[in-house]
Amino acid sequence: MTVRAPFEIHWNSPEELAALQSKRLPQVLEWASASPFYQERLFASGAPPTSVDLPSLPLTTKQDLRDQRPFGMLAVPRRRVATYHESSGSAGQATPSFYTEQDWEDLVERYARKWVAITAEDTFLVRTPYALMLTGHLAHAAARSRGATVVPGDNRSLATPLSRIVEVIRDLRVSLTWSMSTETLLWAAAARATGLDPTSDFPELRALFVGGDPLTPERRQRIGEIWGVPVVEEFGSTETGSLAGQCPAGSMHLWADRVLFEVLDPVTGTSSPEGRGRLVVTPLYREAMPLLRYDLEDDVEVSYTACMCGWPLPTVRVLGRSAWEYRADGRPVTQHDLEAAVFGLPARYGVLFWRARAGRNGLVMEFEVAPEYRADAVARLRTAVQEALGIVPDLRPVAPGSLVPHGLLTASQDVVKPRSLFAEHEDWDRAVLYH
């Protein structure tokens, strides 16, 4: 299944790839020496660290970035900064990120490494946040760099409810989309709510690009079946841009020619190029805000075993975050585990939306399912969860529309500009946010 890679290859083995990384590290350390944070931590006394010293340097954490906001991580004069971004993440605290124009060249190139190529013939819907986050701006810039027509759909704007997005995909003949994977399920439900069939009524659609939320192989397969197109996954962050992308064989490959990756054993504190642990990254082309051994806090499994696609890059399985692991009746539970069980149910059951709560008294799961499949779905899901986790869940099937209301799928909100003059029947207490 060897296919041409959507990026230039200047190495033929893991050893040559490591040599390419080592060649870049002196530049990375030089850039880092201009950052107030790294000046104080690494360069204040004694000889500055070299490439050989990198594995022994302390980790850079998300909290470090938060503590240094706004300018403690900045390594270039402010006049050279092209864009500033923030990601609040799960902690609710802003994590700053700066990029120069040169940094953006690298960001765009890595994002555009899709095996379903972005072309000038495409109409590309961006359905991730613009605001302060990187994700929407990155997809927008990458699509424009390839000549595509961009539709800036956002996903945190009152002006683009789900019904409007479905209308845009159909009427503008959108061929590529970028969103969280959960969004694609919501679009499918919204389309069906208006009598459209996602598989047949959007013939221009070529692929769904997804990232930003956990995605098991089971759910990725289900989304592909619903829409009848490839689902191409991406892994990255606002602090780093794209770190990995999916190949035609379905594996995720780390962009190790642009970023140095380590797998950290959280128990021993040691790291290695592959294995299972937490992913630590050192971007090799990051000038505005260099990051040395940045702990993403994501649990992964990295392998250098050759992939059938032929891309000479390590593969990665993203397992989520241990911080998001809960315990039910004393046993560990992750969303990844439960999602695999839910989307292992037969497609004809129509189960798309679910939720669960873990606690000392066990695991409670609710999921939408049509009445005629309720008994079979409960029996199958109970067996799957028990086999995977050793827990007998309290399963509560609910009618379609209980977790994702029909009104959310069909609402068409009219958002207008703020104003100060109103008719007598209008609510002028909402002058600034009238809609």
Image: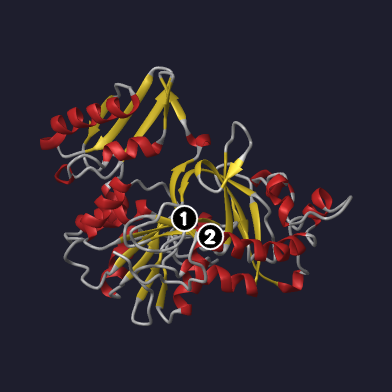
* Residue 422 % position (x, y): 48, 65
> Is 117 located above or below residue 342 in the figure?
below
Residue most extreme to the left? 372
Circle 2 — which element?
loop
Quarter of the picture containing the N terminus is: bottom left
* Residue behind mark 2: 256
Q: CA distance from mark 2 to mark 1?
A: 7 Å
Which quarter of the figure has residue 91? Answer: top right
* Circle 2/circle 1 CB separation < 8 Å: yes
Circle 1 — which element?
loop
> Is 82 located above or below residue 275 in the figure?
below
Depth check: give the residue in front, 9 or 359: 9
> Is 426 located above or below residue 82 in the figure?
above
Quarter of the picture containing the C terminus is: bottom left
**Which amino acid type corresponds to the residue marked 2 in the rendered image?**
Ala
Q: Left or right: 113 with respect to 79? A: left
**Which amino acid type corresponds to the residue marked 1 in the rendered image?**
Pro
Give whichever of discs 2 and 1 has the lower sequence position.
2
> Is 187 located above or below residue 262 in the figure?
below
Q: Left or right: 63 with respect to 117? A: right
* Residue behind mark 1: 314
User: Is residue 358 in view from this perspective?
Assistant: yes
At horizontal 30% and vertical 69% (from top left) the residue drawn is: 169
